[in-house]
Image (tube, rainbow, N blue to C red):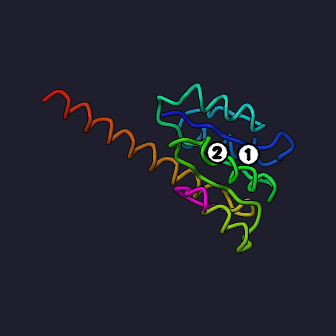
Amino acid sequence: MEIILYAHAANTQKDRLQKKIVQATGQAPDLVCDFDSLFKTIKLKISEHVIIIFLITSVEELDFLNSNAARLFNSRLILILPDEKDSSISKGLHLYPRYIAYMSHDFKDVCAVLNKMIQYNALEEEKLRTFTLK
């Protein structure tokens, strides 16, 4: 399972989140800092199971993601919003994330959800292998 972390280059929280992800999963995410690189990376990994963690810093980023939601394909999303405003949450829900967190909170919950997603994927892959062997 591949993990992609999107965070704007100027986002000061990205290093802390990346460190927590590595500690929690033992896996370093692919860090992308602009949308062009993000969409290219997704295209390269289209045949794999991908989890994308978005560390959103502005409403403009969220609006851009919503207008390009089709380019995310079937990726599993974790969305970290810049604030807890109803309008931000509403826009975030249009992306159908598996989990929504907020930048003002600790990233422990994000790492716990990420671990569960990875474990679930491993179980599904094992079921598929078992099924195809029979």
Q: Secondary structure at mark 2?
A: helix
* Residue 61 image position (x, y, % from top left): 78, 51
Q: Quadrant of residue 8?
A: top right
C-alpha span from label 1 to label 2: 6 Å
Q: Which residue is mark 1?
A: 16
- What is the span of residues highlighted in magenta in the rendered image? 94-100
Residue depicted at 62% across the width and 37% down the height: 4
Figure quadrant of the C terminus: top left
Residue sitting nearer the eye, 111 or 68: 68
Q: Is residue 132 left or right of residue 10?
A: left
Would you say residue 120 sits in the magenta stretch?
no
Q: Is residue 108 left or right of residue 104?
A: left
Residue at the limit of the structure toward the left, as seen here: 134
Amino acid type of the residue that numbered disc 2 sits on in the rendered structure: Lys
* Residue 108 image position (x, y, % from top left): 60, 55
Q: Secondary structure at mark 1?
A: helix
Q: Is residue 124 left or right of residue 89?
A: left
Work out whether 66 lies above or below 27.
Answer: below
Q: Are marks 1 and 2 in contact (CB under 8 Å)?
A: yes
Residue depicted at 75% across the width and 43% down the height: 7
Residue sitting nearer the eye, 90 or 9: 90
Q: Main secondary structure of the magenta part?
A: loop
Residue depicted at 55% across the width and 28% down the height: 45
Q: Which residue is mark 2?
A: 20
